[in-house]
Amino acid sequence: MSVKSRVLVGVSALFIAACQQANNSSEIEVDDAPPVVEADTWSHGAMVAAADPRAVEAGLEALRNGGHAVDAAIAVHTVLGLVEPQSSGIGGGAFMVVYDRESGETVVYDGRETAPMAIDENLFVEDGEVLGFLDAWQSGKSSGVPGAIALYKTAHDVHGHNEWASNFDAAIELADEGFVVSPRLAGTLADARIRQFTRLDDHPVSAAYFFPDGESLAEGAVRDNPDYAETLRRVATDGIETFYTGENAEAIVATLTEAPRPSAITVEDIAGYEVKVRPPLCGNWRDYRICSAPPPSSGGVTQNAIPGLYDRLLPEDATQPFARVRTFVDAQRLAYADRDHYVADADFVQVPAMDLINPAYLDVRATEVFEPGETPTPGDPGLALGGNPMIGLWGQDPTEDAPGTTHFSIVDQEGNVVSMTATVEAAFGNSRMVNGYLLNNELTDFARQPRKSNLPVANAPGPGKRPRSSMSPTIIFDTDGDLKMVTGSPGGNSIVAYVSKTVLAVLDWGDTAQEAVAEPNIIARGETVGVEVDVPGGQEIADELNSLGYNVQERRGENSGLHVIVVTEDGLDGGADPRREGVALALEEAPAEDAPSEATP
């Protein structure tokens, strides 16, 4: 058997099944309005999919108590901030996409961290030289004002069913009584690179917490966090002002203004934080409407552009299973180039988000051919749509996002939905711990070099500005406006690829939710195509792409954390990424009214 024949036989069976699907044409209609659905009775059940079983149980308990998906989200995230602090927490930020079924409205809560008002575009430039990522990361300058707590409150004020304070109960109890350290947390702390590249053990508070007696927390150890419990207790009983003003705000400022490279953050910056409530960025693709977060998130742009480009690039006579894999790669390459160039904080710079997913632009963009080993350049939606050129407005920006992030998906028993991606940026944020939680290093998501070729970079730092994010919390509806899919992932700049993989895997390749998250990850950004080779089908894909001339980077130990819920005729189908420790669990059906209760003798 030839090498090529072996490849095609060995490619994931799910990719093979994909080739049997019809090659549907795509016309994305740009629309930032939410879908509207008739509020008839929801009959598909409820589900929580998240990165830790304890967080999932906290979310399910919130739903058992009559909570909205937003109530469950607060419970889930506060537990995650305790049990997987390397990934997210209340010292970071998030994007939450909420679909409220009764009103038919979808809304985005932007809890992205903000830069201090005293900085300028040269935040990471010293003596004319741009700081390297590690120097920027492990500095006070890297941390923005945390947005997670304010996001909770803003969303709860609109959607919450449960009492505000009750949503913190699970995390407070675990922090008071202690939680069992998971293999993933223990393994991350034991990794020599953590002690080499972070300053966790240089800061007395974080060192004492994560390295008691000089040794990293071991798997199975019980770790309490009374400071975290007290912080949450104050927020729960006295309001979010206890986080954004007073002792807590002063503690944040004190630790971030320590050397080296102290932050310019002030208590006024913290007190002035505001959640941005935004419409989702939605587009129609085939028989679906894809809604995700708008800039500074990359979700709305990329999760619409990649499927649209995929349909335009897929050969009409594609019969080999690998044709769809290659088309997915090429669609990513074009979408990433556009995202890297244009997406930034649209409150500060011009971002042509709707133009980038306009059908007329995608028609043009799909004709721009780049050889497999070539780095695609950004398109120009201005020219493509008959206007003025836009590409020259900004210098090119290849900023990397680090993967200290988590994602969870929730559908409640009324059909309300939360897709939320939260982050502290790199692993363990910027390593500084305050009142039981770690602070973020989110400002390293800005372009550290603010100008390229004498042009400003759209994602350059600025006072009060929010850095660009790869986070792509996504909700998909069918043509009737009914919920079809909830998806999202952590993973730094690879999030774009991870999430779009699940969109195509479920809606084009015919995967279940679990099959979709387990597919080999393929990340096609810039001159390289990263392929996850330590999962079934991955090596075959890498070999085939190599044979076609792509610059393949074989990757192992991928950091995706996809959590997906798909609505089927039989109910909710959940998937939890096997690369992390999560689960997707349905809410138990309520007992019939005439059934005996558990208390019956």
Image: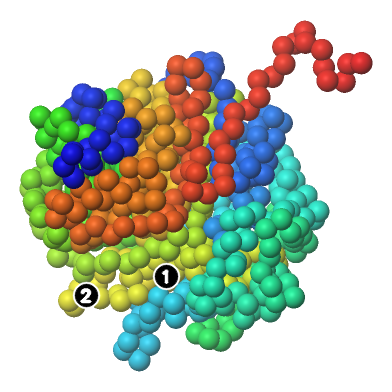
State whether residue 594 is above or below residue 460: above
Which residue is at 70% across, 69% downward? 209
Q: Amino acid at mark 2?
A: Lys
Assign a secondary structure to mark 1.
helix
Q: Is residue 528 visible?
A: yes
* Category of crowding for the residue at label 1, using alpha-carbon neighbours closer than 10 angstroms: few (below 14), some (14–19), many (at least 20): many
Q: Amino acid at mark 1?
A: Thr
Query: Which of the colour schemes (rainbow, by chain, secondary structure, one colour) is used?
Result: rainbow
Measuring from the top left, give residue 513's x and y in whole percent: 44, 32
Which residue is at 67% across, 75% downward? 207
Q: Is residue 95 visible?
A: no
Measuring from the top left, give residue 489's x and y in whole percent: 44, 47
Residue 13 vs residue 41: left or right?
Answer: left
Which residue is at 81% across, 53% downward? 177
Tell me the distance, in whole angstroms, between the alpha carbons under discs 1 and 2.
Answer: 17 Å
Q: Quadrant of residue 397?
A: bottom left
Instruction: List the residue tagged with mark 2.
Output: 452
Which residue is at 56% across, 57% downward? 88
Extreme-top residue of the structure: 594
State whether residue 70 is above or below residue 453: above
Label for residue 374? none
Measuring from the top left, give residue 117's x and y in whole percent: 46, 73
Circle nearer the N terminus (1, 2): 1
Front-most of 78 and 394? 78
Front-most of 587 and 21? 21
Instruction: List the residue tagged with mark 1.
Output: 444
Assign a secondary structure to mark 2.
strand
Extreme-right residue of the structure: 601
Front-most of 414 and 242? 414
Q: Quadrant of residue 242?
A: bottom right
